[in-house]
Image: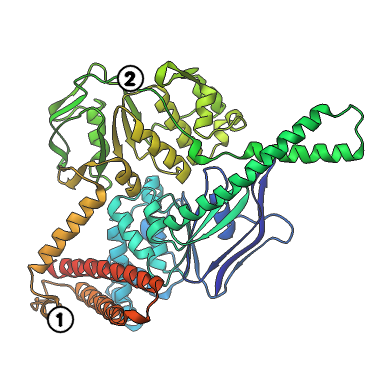
Amino acid sequence: MVYLELERVSKIYGEKVLFDQVDLQVAQHTKVALVAKNGTGKSTLLRVAAGIDQPEGPGSSVYVHKEARMAYLPQEPEFGERATVMDAVYDSDNDLVRAVRDYEEALSRTDKPKLLQDALMRMDRLQAWDIEARIKEVLSKLNIEDVNQQVSTLSGGQRKRVALAKLIIDEPDLIIMDEPTNHLDLDMIEWLEEWLQSPNLTLLMVTHDRYFLERVCNRIIELEGGNIYHYTGNYSDFLDKKATREETESAELDKDRKRMKKELEWVRRMPSGRGTKAKSRLSAFSDLKQKVGSFRREDELTLEIKGQRLGSKILEAHNISKSYGDKELVRGFSYKFQKGERVGIVGRNGAGKSTLLHMLTKELEPDTGKVVHGTNTVFGYYTQEGINLKQDMRVIEVVREIAEFIPLEKGLKLTARGLLERFMFNSKQQQVYVSQLSGGERRRLYLLTILMKNPNFLILDEPTNDLDIVTLNVLEDFLLDFPGCVLIVSHDRFFLDKLAHHLFIFEGEGKIRDWNGLYTEYRDMMREEQRTNYNDTPSRESALPAPPPPSENQISQEQRKAIRRVEGQIGKLEARKAEINQQFNNMASLTPERIAELGKELSEVNDAIEEKEMEWMELVGE
């Protein structure tokens, strides 16, 4: 069953063609990701698919199946000026969600007991207690605490989380999401990833999170040059099939170049009197020249900026601490950076990551301890708040204002124009005003201005937000070859695993764990610790059905309902696990492809059981 279909859809702004007569289908229960360079129309295509923007072009149409309830998550959600978080989250046509909202409102109206009585009766009649527990779980996972706060007072990241909570609570059939992981911390991202893996969801999203592409998506669509290319499978499959396509195109390009050389010789010999046949051939030559000139392989993009030499002393933190009131963000942190280190920083939003960076750069004075900078250390500090480019300047002017030439290795120099080319701003884009750039293009330009100052110690605070995968690959290659030190705060797990083999992990209450390893290795270790702790408790067969009976003042009705809900979910997962193991008992009847599918599903089911068991233990222990 097709849930969403776009036919012959175009979007053109003046001379800029974002996409031209493209077709797109999203079938029920498929999970489709749209990837493309920044500024090529990804968000615009999503807006057309969601019915926000109208399609252009003759015969264009957008079809959404009548049985598919659709929800759209934009990059920057908007709410009413006076709307509270509760208003936003519970704004739904779902009767169960409305019942929960009335119940929550009645709880705060102690002066009207009849209101609460009616709300309780409605909750019982609709059997909405599981929904109520689910809503509280979603709000908790996304760190949404004050439901009475006005949305207009929230930061952009907080508004994004409120919009995401509303979408999840509403449980739509068809979900369209634009960069859903922006402004989420790593725990939230992993929880969202698990939710999106549900087989009942149908998804179309734009994301640069490559673990999402690998673990969630089963189809990837690439928007390039105004056209759409379709790839079945996950991110690994996409990379493999894209490479095959580009090899084919490269072979065709070699033929085109030879033809173009012959045509060029003919054009130069051609007499001034041009007949109809000559004009036709000139037109063909022009088309061929444009085709060859527009081709550029992404793997040829490189950055070779020469960093300044570091001294023996680089950056040292000696027993630094920072608190705000009763909230301790950093407690007794000490570290001495060595040459060539690439360190990642991870932790929940608000845990103190940016506070640590501000202290290390001496923008903020620690309450205790001291920070020492080496005499040769030159910082390049990329922050979300630092993106303050002049809107009325052209891209080339922004770069030239910093420097006209950039030092390279072996004594060579690179012009500002040449550096922009290497950072995927072609000659035409260099003349564009900053105000006309997309969000990702502005971040790319800002990042380039940081690199141009020739630092030897890079501090990057969430550098991957809104950057496309092509830019991320270029940035990663540069950072891997960067001779200086790199300190990265990022929620991009793939980015962290590729670059940082050493982590500072904020664990709460000012404690920072110094972890020598990859982020995924840390998560595996944490899961193993949780599994060990769980195995030290009575087995699930005895523990789950018959926990010690708590008294009425020890556990609420809501908690009991949540416990029963989780027990039911564990039971279903265990049943599916048994079914998969039964199929493995008859291996002879299975194809290699089917064995791989079942192995992947078994791993996912085991992970889900583990998560639900931990959730059950938390509920019982409350």
- At label 1, counting other C-alpha atoms closer than 10 Å, the crowd grade (few under 14, some 14-19, many 20 or more) is few
Q: In which quarter of the image is residue 296?
A: top right
Calculate the distance from the C-alpha at mark 1 to the C-alpha at mark 2: 64 Å
Q: In this view, does 249 lie to the left or right of 308?
A: right
Residue 80 seen: no
Residue ID for mark 1: 545
Query: Residue at coordinates 58% horizontally, 50% vertically from top-left?
Result: 248
Query: Residue at coordinates 57% horizontally, 55% vertically from top-left?
Result: 229
Residue 422 vs 57, above or below: the answer is above
Q: Is residue 329 left or right of residue 204?
A: left
Residue 191 vs 383, above or below: the answer is below
Residue 152 vs 355, above or below: the answer is below
| Three-letter amino acid code of the residue under disc 2 | Gln
Per the image, label 2 sits on a secondary structure element best described as: loop
- Indicate the position of residue 88 as horizontal and vertical percent values: 41, 59
Label number found at residue 555? none
- Indicate the position of residue 577 as horizontal and vertical percent values: 27, 77
Query: Residue at coordinates 67% horizontally, 43% vertically from top-left?
Result: 255
Residue ID for mark 2: 308
| Three-letter amino acid code of the residue under disc 1 | Pro
- Indicate the position of residue 438 as horizontal and vertical percent values: 53, 40
Q: How is the image coloured?
A: rainbow
Query: Which quadrant holds the C terminus?
Result: bottom left
Query: Which quadrant holds the N terminus?
Result: bottom right
